Image (spheres, rainbow, N blue to C red):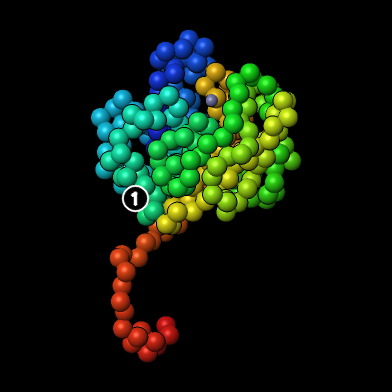
């Protein structure tokens, strides 16, 4: 079965800023979708903020195995009912890959339960991302470190819960450091945060960045479609008498 991916994008900067439009003429979501389609075994849809229900109708969400999320200037415009819909689906097994400024999205803050605040400065300095968990599937094909010549700086402290896994640490030319790729599980859903992707830099054309996003999609896909026990059962102890298969 192919992995059914929905790339969700705010899609506002490209409409207002010529520099961003030059980098992503059809929007970042299309750049990411085009890459994911080359990988095979993945079905890709896109959804954007200004579509009805932000492109995330119940049927779209219910038939999504992994969702990507990029937002920035319009986090507040995302309806709480849609956030709850996506949250429920994550708890039931959908993977969620949160990108860059998505750290302040309603859905990420809801799932983390913390402010998700961080330090930032946009002066286009150099970012070096170092592997802290060699051999992890999300880092397949990434050797020790890679460099983005121009990116926005994000610095610690990043107010998120202790992650299940810390996969990358960034160092910036101005000396700050940042936990750039982390994972958590909520319910049976796997969540990945991956830092690069400021809209005025070509990070979503970088092969290593794309590779990690593709790996994250495969890693976050639900196993067996996700399985969540319903409610709080009160079973009879007779289950102990069940004979082994
Ligand atoms: Zn940014």
Is residue 58 toward the left or the right of residue 148 in the image? Answer: left
Is residue 232 toward the left or the right of residue 151 in the image? Answer: left
Residue nearest the viewer, comparing 38 with 62: 62
Percent position (x, y) of residue 85? 31, 45
Percent position (x, y) of residue 207? 62, 30
Is residue 210 toward the left or the right of residue 75 in the image? Answer: right
Percent position (x, y) of residue 232? 32, 69
Residue at 35%, 65% in the rendered image: 229
Outermost residue toward the top in this view? 18
The answer to whether residue 45 shows anywhere in this view is yes
Q: Give residue 58's quadrant in the image.
A: top left
Residue tagged by mark 1? Answer: 88
Residue nearest the viewer, comparing 214 with 94: 94
The answer to whether residue 214 shows anywhere in this view is no
- Number of labels in the image equals 1
Packing grade of label 1 (10 A; few <14, some 14-19, many >=20) is: some
Q: Please, is residue 105 above or below residue 228 in the view?
A: above
Residue at 50%, 16% in the rendered image: 20
Q: Please, is residue 137 above or below residue 34 in the view?
A: below
Mark 1 CB in 8 Å range of ligand 1?
Answer: no
Percent position (x, y) of residue 140? 64, 44
Residue at 51%, 39% in the rendered image: 116
Name the element at disc 1: helix
Q: Give residue 213's quadrant in the image.
A: top right
Quadrant location, the C terminus? bottom left
Residue at 67%, 40% in the rendered image: 169
């Amino acid at each position: 079965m192919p992995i059914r991916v929905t790339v969700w994008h705010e899609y506002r900067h490209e409409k207002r800023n010529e520099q961003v439009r030059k980098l992503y003429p059809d929007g970042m979501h299309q750049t990411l979708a085009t890459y994911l389609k080359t990988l095979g075994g993945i079905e890709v849809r896109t959804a954007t903020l200004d579509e009805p229900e932000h492109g995330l109708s119940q049927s779209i969400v219910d038939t999504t195995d992994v969702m990507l999320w990029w937002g920035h200037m319009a986090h507040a415009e995302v309806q709480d009912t849609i956030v709850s819909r996506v949250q429920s689906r994550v708890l039931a097994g959908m993977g969620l890959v949160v990108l860059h400024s998505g750290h302040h999205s309603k859905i990420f803050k809801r799932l983390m339960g913390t402010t998700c605040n961080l330090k930032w400065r946009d002066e286009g300095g150099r970012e070096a991302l170092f592997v802290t968990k060699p051999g992890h599937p999300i880092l397949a094909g990434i050797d020790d470190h890679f460099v983005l010549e121009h990116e926005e700086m994000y610095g610690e402290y990043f107010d998120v819960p202790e992650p299940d896994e810390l996969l990358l640490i960034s160092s910036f030319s101005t000396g700050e450091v940042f936990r750039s790729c982390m994972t958590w599980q909520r319910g049976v859903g796997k969540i990945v945060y991956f830092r690069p992707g400021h809209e005025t830099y070509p990070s979503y054309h970088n092969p290593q960045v794309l590779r990690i996003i593709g790996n994250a999609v495969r890693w976050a896909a639900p196993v067996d479609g996700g399985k969540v026990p319903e409610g709080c059962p009160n079973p009879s102890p007779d289950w102990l008498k069940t004979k082994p298969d």
